[in-house]
Amino acid sequence: MSDLAAHADPLEELKQTNTGVENKKMAMWAFLASDCMFFGTLISTHLIYRKIYPTVVDPTQIFSIELTGFSSFILLMSSFLMALTVSSAHKGNLTSMRTFLLGTILFGGVFLGGQVYEFSHFVHEKGLTLSSSVFGSTFYTLTGTHGIHVALGVFWLAMWFFATLPKKFSQFTREERLPAQLITFWVALPVVMVLVYFIHHHSTAYLLIAAGWLVLFPVLMLVTTPLRGRYSHVNALDVETAGLYWHFVDIVWIIIFTAVYLVEYL
Amino acid sequence: MSTTDATYGIWNRPLKKTGIVGFLTTVDHKKIGIGYAIGALFFLLVGGVEALIIRLQLMVPENNLVDARTYNELFTMHGTTMVFLAVMPLSAAFFNYIMPLQVGARDVAFPRLNALGLWCFFVGGIVVNLSWLYQVAPAIGWFGYAPLTTKPYSPDIGTDFWIVGLQILGIASLAGSFNFITTILNMRAPGLSMMRLPVFTWMTLVTSFLIILAFPPITIALVELMFDRHFGTHFFDVGGGGKPILWQHLFWIFGHPEVYILILPAMGIISEVLPVFSRKPLFGYPLVVFSGAVIGFLGFAVWSHHMFTTGLGIVATSAFAFLTMLISIPTGVKIFNWIGTLWGGRIRFTTPMLFALGFIWMFMLGGFTGIMHSSPPVDAQQQDSYFVIAHFHYVLIGGSIFALLCGIYYWFPKVTGKLMNDNIGKLLFYTIFVGFNLAFFPMHILGMTGMPRRTHTYKAEMGWAEPNFWSTIGALILGFGILFVVIQLIYSCFRGQPSGENPWDARTLEWDTSSPPKEYNFGYTPVIHSRDQVWENKYGAAEKKMGKIAPGPHGIHMPDQSWWPLMVAIGLFISGMGVIFHHQPMSTLLPFLPEGIHFHILYFTGFGMVVTFMSIILWAIEGPGGYHLHPTAEELEGAVQPDPQQGGHH
């Protein structure tokens, strides 16, 4: 915008509010306060019913704490990558920002994959469904709501990733390390899926996911064309705001992981 | 004078300011405020008609004007409509229109998000009321207690209309509140410190915090109820191990802050009007602000006083009784400060002033009965009786509605630049005042003599006939009074006398700009030096007068209009209808279709979600946009050029 161009740093300009906090960030803090009550209600519902029915379902027979512990660790590490993303966004280092953003998205995706696996495993092999017991009702509603939050976060960060790409495909090779980053991101998931297929168990679902991603990623590159080339330094604030959301969702998971999973092993 | 900088997004943005397109795509907080007011007044009349049918049914013993089922639908829809579709949006209308003017801002922080709030309000109101057209209005009470709302007891889709409508209305309230919080904290004019803010703006802030913290519990409770009804969960289903009492807790954790969401804006309006017509600054300003915040804070700690008779145990009951009584202290502080404002003032009995004085008196009466039920043994007597109905209608009509009507008469000249006839206004005030007291005072006696709530008829020998008869007469008078206020409002929009900028000689910043305000609110950036700035400009010392900073050479930056807020709301409507008609045959949703079409209606939800998400993405892509306007030289008289080092305040 022309009236901002006169100033050295447009990001500093946005901080010229009464509180010194940018408007978008202030609104995000207000949203997160609201979201605390949102998750607070869900967690309370779960804990209340857990207290009333301590013995109806034994969650330790259902949970696979190793898997969930691993995916929780991955989610926490994604917060670390998010912090690095925001830092490089503010420094204007687009190359490392893309790396860390892809890492955050990938780790968020791994967490989501773990949750999808967990849900399908619980439903098909452990018989825990939304309607099988109150535990099932509260468990799926709470962790599912968190999963939707992570999915929206992944989606949001992906939009910013696409926005950082150059407008034309022909310009891609001029960007430092960009082709390598994209190719790594494209093949990383299928490689992991194929490995899981051979090492863990031979379910064709893994191969289908691998194949699906190989097809889906180029399609995503095409349909997100209107997003590309829109990122400028002033959008570091938007990335930071998305980061606030991301960190919050991770912190909530620490509480959920403790209150829903770890408590059962005391 | 306007220039468009650039075209953002994939398609051209709507530029037309007038007509249908101009309204549907507006991002101007003033037009959005008027939109809220139109919707709220419409639903106020709808809810009023529902109330009058209830009263006519109860006018004589063993009446059969409506059957029991319809009666249940009527009181459910009356409560839901009045709380969510009349009082809250009418408050939101004032938040939208007045608050940005009071803080000296050009608009709210996120103009398109503000539009989303308006459209979600309309969509939510339409969804809830569509249940009448499908002849399955919810019959569960506005509180929707489980297990009555679960599938075995309410098998028809009326409850689903209620659930989905409330969810969409929740989005409206939340979107608005994030916006108002950011605007008030971040976008005040230079020099306008928090303790110089008008009390109405303060109460907007407190109410917004109440909304963002109180709506999530009801959102989750509604999600849980929806899952119980559609996907077989057991949150409130006793057979499956659920506890219906959980609903009551979650509902009232929302519901009690909700009643302060309804009353705090009213208190803010009163705190604006009393000083103006007493010709004195507000007495004890910091205490009025602080007690408003304390009421908001305590509002989260008293929900169980709605549940004294459910057997919470002695400790919990005593604690909640104590906290409830505590609330009477900040409320009392406010009332004494209002009286202190009046004391020794040169009082002008204009229509807004009469409503404000009526508010103090009537709200106190409602408050006294409130203190009565804060005592659990007394509450056990009054629970579910007409005494409770008398109590909350005294605080909601005598309180909220009186204050909102006060606000309408007070700010009408600001919004339209025209006057409402004061003599007619006074006549209508007395009509409403008499009708209201005649309608609701007898209910105290009815309650004391044992008449239960939510009963569609009674036997003649109960001795309730006479108070009920007079109550109905009062309700009719009240109804006509409010109808004529709306008629006078519409009439004055077209035929009112011109009011000039500041007909009341009022004191806060919104009266410094023209009436109605220009699109950009203020041609200059006001620099505030005192609390009652417009009075100080006229009567104050030189150093207290307001400074003016002219906009830079680019002019005033204005946001572009947008289609996407409306499209997001339409997407929510489609997905909401999909949820409501889930499990129903296609011919229930669209009765003109032949029966036997097999279509999974939940697919509509998927489609609606796609519409919503695509609209959000396109919203993000198009960006806020913007163009520049240049105020006239006349408006900028006395304004200084901006300091080039400072920048910013566009």
Image (cartoon, coloured by chain):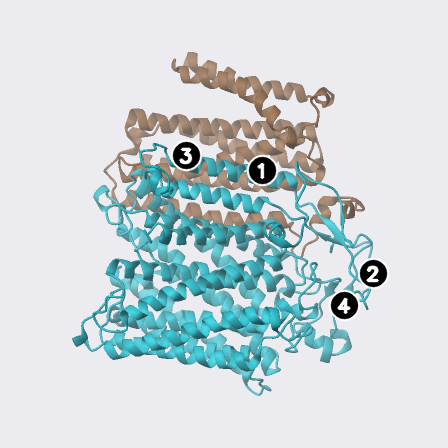
Chain colours: A brown, B cyan
Query: Which mark identifies residue A210?
Result: none
Q: How far across and how far down the image is residue B77, in percent?
A: 36, 59
Task: Establish whether labels 2 and 1 are both on one chain.
Answer: yes
Q: How far across and how far down the image is residue B189, in percent?
A: 69, 62
Q: Amino acid at mark 3?
A: Tyr
Q: CA distance from mark 4 to mark 1?
A: 42 Å
Q: Is residue A124 above or below residue A257?
A: above
Q: Which residue is mark 1?
A: B617
Q: Secondary structure at mark 4?
A: strand
Q: Which residue is mark 4?
A: B547
Chain hosting mark 1: B
Query: Which mark identifies residue B603?
Result: 3
Q: Which residue is mark 2?
A: B641
Q: Nearer the viewer, mark 3 or mark 2?
A: 3
Q: CA distance from mark 3 to mark 2?
A: 58 Å
**Are the residues flagged by discs 2 and 4 in contact, CB closer than 8 Å?**
no
Q: How many marks?
A: 4
Chain hosting mark 2: B
